[in-house]
Amino acid sequence: MVTLPSSHSPTLNPLYRQVIGLVMRSLESGEWKPGEVIPSETLLAARYGVSQGTVRKAIDELAAEHLLVRRQGKGTFVATHADPRIFSRFLRVAANDGDLQPLRSEPLGCWRVKAGSDICHALNVEEGASVMLVRRVVLSGEMPAIFDEVYLAADFFADLTQETLLAGDVSLYGLYESQFGVRVIRAEERVRAILADPVSARFLQVAEGEPLLLVERTTFSYSDRPVEFRRSIFSTRHLHYRNELV
């Protein structure tokens, strides 16, 4: 049984928040891996020495944050990027006519490069540190839709190769999870309009100077560790960036 601190001090986290912290510690350590079922609320209550209601409240919050998934009659599972519902959280592409063609990834290359100051800041690495750079095009049907430049912390992805990318699917996060044990749990984004430069124009098959959408994203794993900085350039001829606020 894990002993939680007891105090009437209002400065302490509520008990269910402390349980969240303990569950997160088990997720980060890999005790419960993506796609695996976690112990029942009864077992967790006994393990942590709290009520089942306290555990339920903690699990409810983690499920609301898409870290856990409840399945009726089966239990509670660690969320995985293999689940289409999780996949759709991080890919906000929608067709202008409502009929989105199947997406596929076409890797263009994978290199180790020296990071510039903006990349170093995003990935929390030293100036000039070595990082992995992935370039790819995401196609909707046969139409280029997104040109990606993805910078990855080399500590996590030193063994990433073009062959690994070619063997994967459109979800890089699924690849990070299955091949490198790195789980993306949240992202921060900035969105702005840009004009196509020669590189993006060539890969997206548009004219130079055509309006495009740039989405800059930093993704994080457990303990708020930066994993990836991504520049995604969207062609908006047939697609748009869709975000649902609830």
Image (cartoon, grey):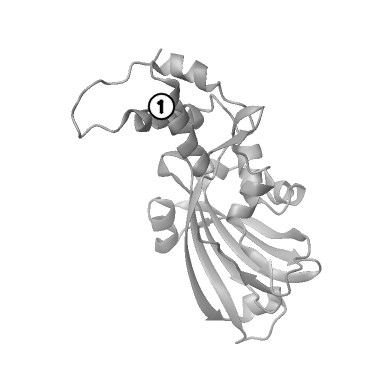
Residue drawn at the location 63% of the way across and 81% of the way down? 198
Residue ID for mark 1: 54
Residue drawn at the location 70% of the way across and 50% of the way down? 165
Quarter of the N terminus within the rendering: top left
User: Where is residue 39, by image quadrant?
Assistant: top right
Residue drawn at the location 44% of the way across and 15% of the way down? 47
Q: Secondary structure at mark 1?
A: helix
Q: Position of residue 63 (x, y in %)?
A: 52, 39
Counting the numbered discs, the total is 1
Q: Is residue 18 above or below residue 193?
A: above
Q: Is residue 87 above or below residue 57?
A: below
Report the side of 170 relative to 61 (left or right): right
Q: Position of residue 33 (x, y in %)?
A: 59, 30
Q: Is residue 70 above or below residue 187?
A: above
Q: Position of residue 176 (x, y in %)?
A: 61, 43
Q: Position of residue 175 (x, y in %)?
A: 66, 44
Question: Can you name the residue that lies furthest to the right here?
Answer: 142
User: Where is residue 107, by image quadrant?
Assistant: bottom right
Does the rendering let one see residue 231?
A: yes
Does the rendering let one see residue 155?
A: no
Q: Amino acid at mark 1?
A: Thr
Q: Residues within 10 Å of mark 1 (few under 14, many from 20)?
A: many
